[in-house]
Amino acid sequence: MTRIEAIDLAAAYVDSGQMQSDLGALVAYKSESQNLAQAPVLRQYLVEALQPRLEALGFECALHDNPTAGGGPFLLGSRIEDEKLPTILTYGHGDVILGQDDQWREGLEPFVLTQEGDRLYGRGAADNKVQHLINISALEAVLSARGRFGFNVKIVMETSEEIGSPGLKEMMTLHRDALASDVLIASDGPRLSAERPTIFMGSRGGISFDLLVDLREGAHHSGNWGGLLADPAILLAHALASITDARGQIQIPEWRPTSLTPLVRAALRDLPVGTNSTPTVDTDWGEQTLSPSERAYGWNSFAVLAMKSGVPEAPVNAISAHARAHCQLRYVVGTDAQDVLPALRRHLDARGFKQVQIVPQDKGIFAATRLDPDHPWVDYVRASLKRTSGDDPHVLPNLAGSLPNDCFADTLGLPTIWIPHSYMGCNQHAPNEHVLIPLCRQAVQNMAGLFWDIGTGCPQ
């Protein structure tokens, strides 16, 4: 059979409704890694939903407990056709965030896949269940068409990505030799455009921390003590305001990256950001001298994710004893991650905010990674996707969000190529999460074409 026939088989998988049926079965697993009560479901997802399908493809699979307490299990698999052939490593995660059952609109449930027009609604539909389903089904199409892959495949499936991938780096270290490969090709995150493929080669890192002002025991009457007791909320607000200016431009020199090179700027120059999606981009927010694409993919951003003082739901006439803000820095390569919090401490102290404590968070820390846009594997994948889709893919040096890509790029030493199968408006991590059927159809065709091409030759 031919490349076109393999691509047609992949398209028929969607056109027949089989993809929708398979995705519905995956979404039905309540694999919430943030919910300890669902821990058994994480294992069931790997053993019941994925392992039989991979073994039918000729993979040898093994289930592994997480080496880190509190993390979900891993499934490692491999199909080795010939040690002399190139080896592709792929990855996915079977866990999802909390279902948020009571926040979905009428007629939708998080763990029941619901089709409305071209949309398939369900928790995990976009992140990440349809993404690894598409890649596996594309491998199935190639195997059916050619009788072999023409390359070796190894797969890592984890179940703790939504809580920061605990244990993943340790697993990659423990199994480094067994997972040795030529390249990582995996899928997560959104495309820039629903109609056009996207490639990204890394991700921004993420560091989360709390800023805490804890001044005394208990609240005190604001009439009797107002003007006499320092207000922790006001102190915290001024401390936060010193980190950026009024349009969000970072004011800590060590937090301003050094890696926005001419090559990276050229790669980002014509990329659409936030087009045809909700919400719209605030053009007067962020680093003033940078374009929106440079701010999102080539620069750092600071955000206050939550903050509290007193009891907002039932305020009383009292000066609070403490105030807390949960903060996050998303950062690119060219930022010294080890100096992020020490630099913040120096910054706060120099401005008189010694009372503001920095409380590091152990979860959700990912390192920043990036592969040069002119790497041979980037050119190869880009050409294959263009051949199949007819569109030159958008190419990002790194995703704006964070992924555990350092486990593959740094620990395993691999070039990393990510090909997302969702889009910016998919409501990832929110109620009403969904995927688009036309996008999925194009994606499975793209991946079948790419896997076919790898079986006929790849970068040396």
Image (tube, helix red, strand yellow):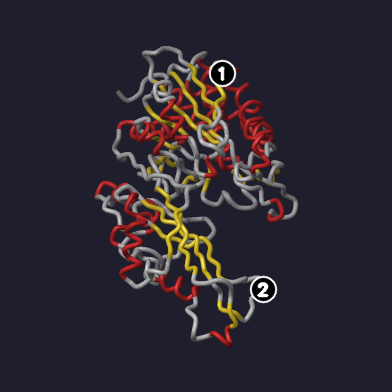
At 55% from the left edge and 20% from the top edge, which residue is drawn? 61
Query: Residue 137's x, y, as percent?
Result: 57, 27
At 43% across and 35% down in the image, what residue appears? 169
Q: Are dots 2 and 1 in contact, CB under 8 Å?
A: no
**Residue 18, placed above or below residue 296:** above
**Which amino acid is tagged 2?**
Ala
394 with respect to 376 (left or right): right
For disc 1, the marked residue is: 57
For the C terminus, the quadrant is top left
- Give SS at disc 1: loop
Q: Quadrant of residue 235?
A: bottom left
Q: Amino acid at mark 1?
A: Leu
| Residue 94 visible from this viewpoint | yes
Q: Which residue is mark 2?
A: 314
Give whichever of 352, 206 is nearer the camera: 352
Label 2 crowding class (10 Å Cα cut-off): few <14, some 14-19, many 20+?
Answer: few
Task: Indicate the position of residue 8 as horizontal and vertical percent values.
Answer: 55, 26
Which of the two discs, 2 and 1, sits closer to the camera? 2
Q: Position of residue 117 (x, y in %)?
A: 67, 46
Q: In the depicted view, which residue is nearer to us: 262 or 7? A: 262
Instruction: Using the rendered view, name the quadrant where residue 55 is placed.
Output: top right
Marked residue nearer the N-terminal end (2 or 1): 1
Please determine whether, in this image, residue 405 is positioned above or below residue 234. above
Residue at the left extreme, as displayed: 262
